[in-house]
Image (spheres, rainbow, N blue to C red):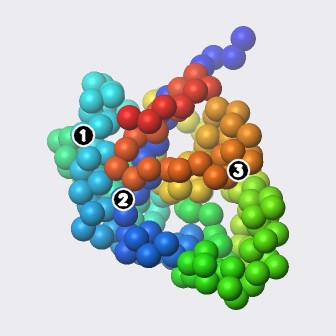
Amino acid sequence: MHSPRPTIYFIRHGETDWNLEGRLQGQKDIPLNKLGRVQAEEAGRRLRSVCPHYEDLAYVASPMRRTRDTMEILRGTIGLPPQGYGVDERLIEITFGAWEGMTWKEVRRAEPQLAALRERDKWNYVPPGGGESYAMLVDRIRPVLDDLTRDTVIVAHGGVARAFLSLCCGISSRQAASMDIWQGRVLVLQDRKHRWV
C-alpha cells in the first residue's frame, strides 16, 4: 500500500514580455512584466483560498528570475516573508536550444522539417543546439517528486508543469505536451488527480 504523495500546489510564473510575444523562453532569464506581477498576486490569493494552512507548506521555486519574483510577490501577498523559500535547480524550464528567443511561426519558417518532426512527437523531440525533450525533462523532475516530504508550493514553468502532470497524474505524454498551463492560477496535484483553482 503506497502512502499518498504530498499535495503539490503548482504555480506557473506570471507573464513576461516574451510570453506576450509568443517567444520560446526556455532557460533565458526574462523578467515578469506588469501583468505578470498582478498574476503573481492573484496566484497568492487563490493559494490562500484553496489552502487555509498555507503557512505550514514548503515553498520551492525554479532559480530563474521570473519564478523567484512570482514566488516573492505571492508570499508577500499572503503575508509571508518574501524570501522564505527554497530554490531547486532541477525545476528550471525545459530548454529549446537554438530556438530560444524565436516564436513558433519563426521556427516553422526557418526550419520547417524540424518543426514538423516536433509536431509529430512533441514529447520526445529534442530541439537542435542542445535542446531538451519533455521525456528528458521528466527524468530531471522525477527526483524532485521523490524528495518531497510534505505539501509543497512549487513555482516553476509551463514545461515543468506538463512533466508533473505526466508523473503525478498519469496523463498521457501526447495530452500533457499540449495542455494549457495558466498564469495567475494554482494547479493542485493531489491523489493522482489535478484541478485548477
Q: Secondary structure at mark 2?
A: loop
Amino acid type shown at disc 2:
Gly
**Residue density around tag 2, few if under 14, some if 14–19, many if 20 or more, within 10 Å:** many
Give the numbered dot on residue 90.
none
Label pair 2/1, CB-CB below 8 angstroms: no
Q: Residues within 10 Å of mark 1 (few under 14, many from 20)?
A: some
Which residue does the numbered mark 1 point to in the structure image? 45
Looking at the image, residue 48 lies above or below residue 30: above
Secondary structure of the residue carrying numbered label 1: helix
CA gap, disc 3 and disc 1: 29 Å
Where is residue 195 drawn, in percent x and y?
A: 48, 31
Q: CA distance from mark 2 to mark 3?
A: 22 Å
Q: Which residue is mark 3?
A: 138
Q: Determine crowd level at label 3: few under 14, some 14-19, many 20+ residues with C-alpha closer than 10 A.
A: many
Instruction: Tell how many labels.
Output: 3
Identify which amino acid the numbered label 3 is placed on: Val
| Earlier residue among tags 2 and 3 | 2
Instruction: Return the disc, 3 or 1, that comes first in the chain's sequence.
Output: 1
For the residue marked with disc 1, what is the amino acid?
A: Arg
Residue drawn 27% across the image and 63% down it: 35
Measured in 3D between alpha carbons, the distance from the residue under mark 2 to the one under mark 1, in whole angstroms, is: 14 Å
Above or below, comparing residue 13 to residue 117 in the picture: above
Whether residue 132 is visible to the viewer of this picture, yes or no, is yes
Locate residue 126: give its quadrant: bottom right
Q: Which residue is mark 2?
A: 14
Q: Is residue 65 visible?
A: no
